[in-house]
Image: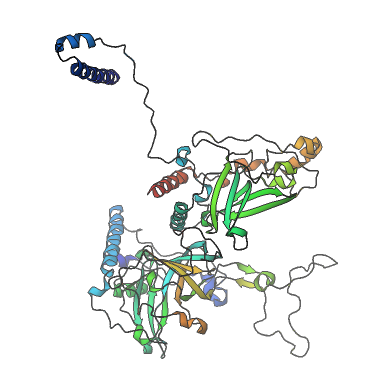
Amino acid sequence: MAACVKGLDKCMFSLRLLRNHQLQNERFLSTSLCRLNAEQPPKFTPPPKPVIIDKTQTEASLRKFLSPEFVPPRQRADPFKFFIERKDMIRRRKVLNIPEFYVGSILAVTMGDPNASGKSNRFVGICIQRGGKGLGASFVLRNIIDNQGVEICYELYSPRIQQIEVLKLEKRLDDNLMYLRDAMSEYSTVDPNMKPVPFSPTGEVPVNQLRVRMRPKPWSKRWERPRFNIKGIRFELALTPEQMEHAQKWEQPWNEYDMMKEYDTSTLEEQVRSEVQREMSK
Amino acid sequence: MWSCRLLLQRGTRLVSPRAAGSPANLVCCIRTVKTTTWFEEHLTEDNQEYMRKSMAEEIRRQTTEKLNPLKDELWQRNEWTEGSRRVGLVAIKLGMAPIWTKTGERHVVTMLQVQDCHVLKYLSKEEYDGHTAALMVGGKNVSPFQRSEEDMEIFRNAGVPPKQKVTTFKVSDNAIIKPGTPLYAAHFRPGQYVDVTAKSIGKGFQGVMKRYGFKGQPATHGQTKTHRRPGASGPGGDPAKVFKGKKMPGMMGNIFITASGLKIWRVNTKYNVLYVNGSVPGHRNCLLKVRDSVLPTRSSTLLNPPFPTYFTEEEGDLDEDLYDENLFVHTEPSLTLT
């Protein structure tokens, strides 16, 4: 209904313009004649669908992501302590933009260094682990440079970090990619001059279903054991079925029914997320 | 309300008969026989509600009264001189967090919150020990229903809700404060050094390797049933005895330990939180005693502290956060080290 009225409004406006124009040119014609000529109701075209752009929310929050170091750990500490820490974390985030990233994304970090030329050095790598809670949160980037594997652990809130940019945002099948140390080197090499891959701020984060080929055993950890619960390794190329069965001896199937190990953080996360969004938008 | 209080038959002898006989075993005995009644046992439900509400109201009234100590006549305020000692505070250990300096070094700090700290009593030189005067200070507020009459007397005289921890601080004569004044975290300033005393985490009965760091014995090469034992207990025939104080297995922890010379990096005046360098004895949410450091090398850092303590009315315009000069504040841009 409103659309019809809007359409009519536009028509009336354009008609009025025409009429004024004609009046100016054909002063001697009577106004009734003009009205007769111009007043043919044009074909009704519905107006274009309104596109709702939610300008109140920033781009990053459109995906409803809360960085894991904001969620308080399961401790007997006063929630007030986490509240104070969160205030400091938000203050730092207002100065340095810490983007959303997951384990398996490729990041480039510029850090201040007194011994480097230009006083800062840039390291590009794949994120293999995100650890710590609160201000001490850290992430480990891995890359292979000149045939040498290099892993650097950065603290997210350290003042020496000048810039963190996400070159490729993606998730992998596991939360912890430490097994890349025992995988073939092509899986850990990242081009240092890689161009950032564009990704949309809305929608699902792509999960890379890559399963990795391993070097021959021995590995640094027995990744086939069920306690690591790794889905991203091609065990069929590295181990025999007997070895896989032998690894299942360390299975602890009662863990999934253990009620004391359950810790539901959903309500806590919601509270923290709303608080963080409120503070960041101030 | 006071008639109800008499109903509380609080006996101080709550220890079971087993331990009463042998005082040496008091430490080991944990079980207590509770023969007393709690405050609500003989009351009807309405009365219980009323008791709780009236207590909460009284506590609120007392705290609001005490917020402006300058309204009642304060005791005489003197200036700080070299060699004068001022009061300390009772704080709660919240947890630990990292901080960074302006040069990029990372240190850890413990966060201590000062909650409802009030001065309770003044003990003059003669009353206390003959040499120095003392002030009793109390910490966190707790419910009055589980406190004995003798304890409640002190709190009632000061006009203050009952506290969980009550400690005494030795104080020089020019630093005495009227009982009932609240103490805040701004009493300490960043850059100052403090000593923190608290009860360490109790580990129970522990062997000599954990308690004193003895090396024990090897795991293999023929050791029969001897891997964590103390070994020899002293020299041989000449003393022919074991000296007093020989390190042997026993109760570890749950004793008062003082960590001295801890620097204060930051003071939050809004929430009364102190950020103290390094670690502090005690578990999370335990009550600690914080006072100015007595170390001779750190005496020069205490210049013009708020003496005898920090009053909100006089110096009310402190910023919400006071930082030490070397500390990196998170609102500054990232460091470019040179």
Whether residue B31 can be seen here: no
Residue ID at (23%, 73%): B71
| Residue B58 lies in quadrant | bottom left
| Residue A8 lies in quadrant | top left
Residue ID at (48%, 38%): A63
Q: Nearer the viewer, residue A102 or B193?
A: A102
Q: Is residue B28 left or right of residue B220?
A: left
Q: Is residue A62 above or below residue A261?
A: above
Q: Residue furthest right?
A: B222
Q: Is residue B248 left or right of residue B307?
A: right
Q: Nearer the viewer, residue B275 or A260?
A: B275
Q: Quadrant of the C terminus of chain B?
A: bottom right
Residue B130 position in % (x across, y down): 41, 91
Q: Nearer the viewer, residue A59 or B333?
A: B333
Residue B86 position in % (x across, y down): 39, 81
Q: Nearer the viewer, residue A39 or A151?
A: A39
| Residue A137 lies in quadrant | bottom right
Q: Quadrant of the N terminus of chain B?
A: bottom left
Q: Total of numbered circles in the picture?
A: 0
Residue ID at (68%, 38%): A232
Residue A93 position in % (x across, y down): 47, 52
Residue B161 position in % (x across, y down): 33, 67
Question: Coloring scheme of the render?
Answer: rainbow
Q: Is residue B56 above or below residue A103?
A: below
Whether residue B150 can be seen here: yes
Q: Is residue B288 left or right of residue A16?
A: right
Residue ID at (77%, 47%): A219
